[in-house]
Amino acid sequence: MRVVMAMMKHETNTFSPVPTPWSRFEEWSACFGDEVIRAYEPTNMTLSAYIKLCRDEGAEIVSPIAAEAMPSGPVAADAYERMSGAILEAVAKGCDAIMLDLHGAMVAEVTPDGEGTLLVRIREIAPETPICVTCDLHCNLTQAMVDNCDALIGYKTYPHTDMYEVGTTVGRILLAKLKGEADPVMAWGRMPLLSQTLRQGTDDEPFKSLVRLTREAEAAGEVLAATVFGGFALADIHDAGISAVAIADGDRGAAERVVERLNGEIWSHRDDHLYRHEPLEVAVARAKAIEDGPVILLDHADNTGSGGNQDVMTVIAEVMRQGLEDVAVGGLWDPDAVQRMMRAGIGATVTLELGGRTDMPSIGLTGEPLVVTGKVRVLTDGEWVVRGPMYHGLAVSMGPTAVLDTGKMQIVVVSRHHEPWDLGIFLSVGIDPAHKRYVLLKSRIHYRAGFAPIAKHTITLDGTGVTTSDNSLLDYQNVRRPIYPLDRINEPEPQ
């Protein structure tokens, strides 16, 4: 058996000013051919699950590409064609099955539905070849995606710590189809709701109950797999928003009933999908009054993992203004500042215009650097290996990295965008966050994978940036209407 196995992943924030050329995929994880196997087999990610399933079956693995990039703006046309072209070329050479690890919220310059377009093109080449797909929990599911594969599933955890398990589930469904042991059929539907990412943590409501319902349907044997996709509301495309999909064994009606149940639960708790805001100065003052730490401070409006610039200084400036002490910041993107600190050398005292390198025209803001004086404590190449539960075993690079110590605050300054979901962002530069009073992260929910075990308290800080949870700041032009909360809707029909 010959299996084409590939990964093509990007969560696209159409409001983000950060470009997404091919080099951004190269910086993060792009690899080809046998290098894919070497890079991903030791991890706990979806491709590792696919690899094990294929090895157990004695299958020949063809791995044309594995490419992922940190969330940012629309994917450049040449980058999209390079990735999709590699997959299509491998499929065209012939195979018995196709296993794909996609995201579900990729918007490219050439298509608003990166995954659906890829699957349509694959089906044109191989109309009968079975295809399974794993997607991120933040997938904006489309009809093209469902129509052009045999089994599609998504993560049940946010932070995404179940990539391997989900890949195993959908891979087994595909193998059962190949052996004639199962006849997977899918049903899907969505409600007119833009669920906000900050409300999609699967340890919290409303998603805790939604995930429980999917597991109950699977455990009862109603369906082979069920998924609720929170969607990615920062992609201004027609199909953005929450959805549900189920895979049944030959019984489409069973799948439809599970989807209807999930959609009903989603809509009955629609207000729980919206974030409630708090003035920044009030939240920081509340943090200052806490005596025991670590206190996790979340600069979620500049969340790297949702396409943020990672250089907005609003929250850092307020924390400094209120005089919080023993603060570790991870991480701030400012390659120019890193180079200046490297020229100055370890131990040097420097005054920098830090951050604020990027304008944000989609929300009418210009970058505003903050003048900061401190001592250069650490200089590294920014390379380390993830040891926490999310992306475990993957080698990552923050690029040239420096630590600026102001006396009250240690700021990890990086040259490549990287969301701090693992303690390694600090441990790799000699900072133990477990012994800091405050840990300020440009993250939203993923930080929990590494930092939840050490956190005594967590406070969400409503700063500024293109990953804001304030819908009124975003100029939606393409999403289907009416949709809640942009519009008031009383009695919606599943879409």
Image: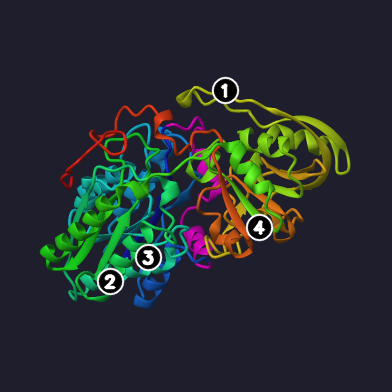
Q: Is residue 18 magenta?
A: yes
Name the spot of residue 262 as percent of width and height, x first: 24, 58
Classify mark 4: residues with Cα within 10 Å, few (<14), some (14-19) or many (20+).
many
Between marks 1 and 2 in the image, the one whose residue lies nearer the viewer: 2
Of the residues shown, which amino acid type is indicated by label 1?
Thr
Circle 4 — which element?
Answer: helix
Q: Which residue is mark 2?
A: 216
Q: Residue at x 50, y 32 (%)?
A: 19
Q: Position of residue 312 (x, y in %)?
A: 60, 33
Q: CA distance from mark 2 to mark 4?
A: 36 Å
Q: Is residue 61 left or right of residue 329?
A: left
Residue 167: assigned label: 3
Its colouring scheme is: rainbow
Residue 403 among magenta residues: no
The magenta segment is 15-42
Does dot 3 land on a helix, a strand or a loop? helix
The three-letter amino acid code for the residue at tag 4 is Gly
Which quadrant of the rendered structure holds the C terminus? top left
- Rendered position, 49 above or below 304: below
Task: Name which of mark 2 and mark 4 comes first in the sequence.
Answer: 2
Circle nearer the N terminus (1, 4): 1
**Label 2 element class:** helix
